[in-house]
Each structure stands twice: as C-alpha cells, then as structure tokens.
Amino acid sequence: MNAQAPVQIIDGKAAAARVLAEVSAEVQAMKARGVAPALAVILVGQDPASQVYVRNKVLRAEECGIRSLEFRRPAETGEAELLDLIHSLNADPDVHGILVQLPLPDHIDEQRVLQAVSPLKDVDGFHAENVGGLSQGREVLTPCTPAGCLRLLQDSCGDLAGKHAVVIGRSNIVGKPMAALLLKAHCSVTVVHSRSANLKDLCRQADIVVAAVGRPRLVDADWLKPGAVVIDVGINRIDEGGRSRLVGDVDFDSAIARAAAITPVPGGVGPMTIAFLMKNTLAAARLQHSDLPATVQHPEAPCLSIS
C-alpha cells in the first residue's frame, strides 16, 4: 500500500493576501475610470469583538484603496434612527457597499435592518433578494465567508465538478450559502446538521468537508475518508491547560492523518472573510456602474488533485 502524501495546510493568510492584491489592482482600474469604491460600516453599541472586526475591516479597505466610512452609534440608538441612516446611504451614489455589523442590540429587529440595505449595496449578501438569487445560481452579492471558502477550494483543488461535498451546519450565514455555491460549482452536495442520522457515515463519503457548526473539535479523523479536503469554518474559544485558545470545529491534530488538505484555525478561513468583503465592495460598485470594464484577470494558483 502506498503511503498517503503529506497533508497540505491551506494557508488562508496567503490566499487572502492574493485576493487583496487583486482587489487593489481592480480598485486602481476603477479609479482610472472615475469611480472610487466606498464602503460604509455601521456599528451600534460597544461590543468588544465587533469593535475589533470593524477596525480590521476599515484597515483592509484603506490598504486596498477603498474609501471607508464609519458610522458608530450608541447602544441605545433607536431602530427608526438606524433605518434612516441606512436609507440615506442607499441613496448616496458615492457609497457602493453598506455593512451593518452584527450583533445589534436586542431592541432592534435585525432582519428588518438587514432587509433595509439595498440589494445592490448589500456586501454581506444577507438581503433576501441576494439569498434568492444565489439559490437560483445568479451572479449576486454572496456572503463573504462561504465565498472565501469556495476560493480556497478552487485554489487548492481546481475544478470541483463531480466532487461530493458535505457541509456540516445549515446556518443562513455559512451553511446554506456554502451549499448553494458548491452546487453552482457542480459538486454533489449533502448538508448535515444536528438532527441528521448517521452523521459520521455521511461525512466519510465526502471528497470535501466544510465544517461550520460551532462545536469545538467535533470532526476528527474518524469522520473523514482518506484524501478528503477539509475546510474548517469554526472559531471556538476554549480553555485548555490553563490558557485560552482558538480551535475549529475540526480536531486538526487528528484530521491531518487522513486529510489531503486542511485549513488551520486560526489562519485559515478567517482572513478570507475580510478579503471577500473587499471583493464584494468592488462587485457592488460594478453593479452600480454597468459601464465599467470586466474584472481584471489574474493567474490561477496551482491545484491539488482530490483522490
């Protein structure tokens, strides 16, 4: 029996750097045509994690040449006031993308706010019109995390057509759009969740496993067939050996014995989420300026053959 080839650790930081370089080149091309892409970020309240996320998003935007606008509002801000702000940004032709940082305070209806953002400026891809368009296979603004996962798979594996992908988790933010993107890439897709029967057996059939369930180290080597490609979306903080650390939904140390390729946590999917927020801002600008030229072409990365 031939020994399995060494596992490929999928470097999300390097992949995100490539995406951001592409974005920077496209931003310059847009500016040469008289369009300066702009992203508006709305933060309500003082949630510490949200503060960090917003700061990182603004920094990445500035690095790419995207103009960033921050709208910070106190936690007691009323829903009507927040909706008025969104409507004004929808009407501003110089703002191309609008992101409302979640979570929102309890007194604000999250869905009402997300649906108030124009579908053409919905860089999170959460508006019902974009969700429906994705399910139909149309070109729409798509949630950043699953879009980043697909790019990692395409960069690592090349053509995904005919591969069997199992998505663990059915959330509106990751699981469902991830399944839709994989279907669009011509994969056979199985979505499993907390009520699925024979969960391990279903996962063992997969060429590609995307874990997005929010349970630390749920998936180990026993869940994988040899040569599977594993994308770990989970970010879970645990206490171990008296220290706090981040781990994924996959038991990395166990899974590398069977996987052909795997994303680490941290340093895997996370950096791609912000990179694709920048890419979505460009896509939104193009949707609003149909006279812009086609996207700049970039060389393809080398591919891993899935067994």
Image (tube, rainbow, N blue to C red):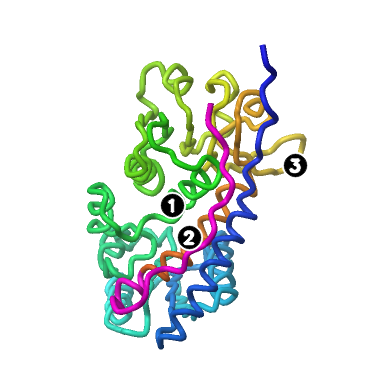
Quadrant of the rendered image containing residue 4: top right
The percent coordinates of residue 206 (x first, y second) are 45, 26
Residue in the picture at 22% in, 48% down: 136
* Rendered image: mark on residue 276: 2
Would you say residue 302 sits in the magenta stretch?
Answer: yes
The percent coordinates of residue 195 (x first, y second) are 35, 24
* Relative vertical location of residue 263 with respect to residue 101 in this rendering, above or below: above
- Mark closer to the observer (3, 2): 2
Tell me the chief SS of the magenta region: loop
Q: Badge 3: how crowded within 10 Å, few (<14), some, or many (20+)?
A: few
Quarter occupied by the N terminus: top right
Q: Earlier in the sequence, mark 3 or mark 2?
A: 3
Q: Secondary structure at mark 3?
A: strand
Q: Nearer the viewer, residue 203 or 282?
A: 282
- Mark closer to the observer (3, 1): 1
The percent coordinates of residue 128 (x first, y second) are 24, 56
Residue in the picture at 57% in, 51% down: 301
Residue in the picture at 32% in, 63% down: 108
* Relative vertical location of residue 152 with respect to residue 8 in this rendering, above or below: below
Q: Pointers 1 and 2 in contact (CB under 8 A)? A: yes
Would you say residue 259 sits in the magenta stretch?
Answer: no
Residue type at mark 3: give it.
Arg
Q: Nearer the viewer, residue 160 or 203?
A: 160
Task: From the image, tell me which residue sits under label 1.
Answer: 147
Start and end of the magenta stretch?
284-307
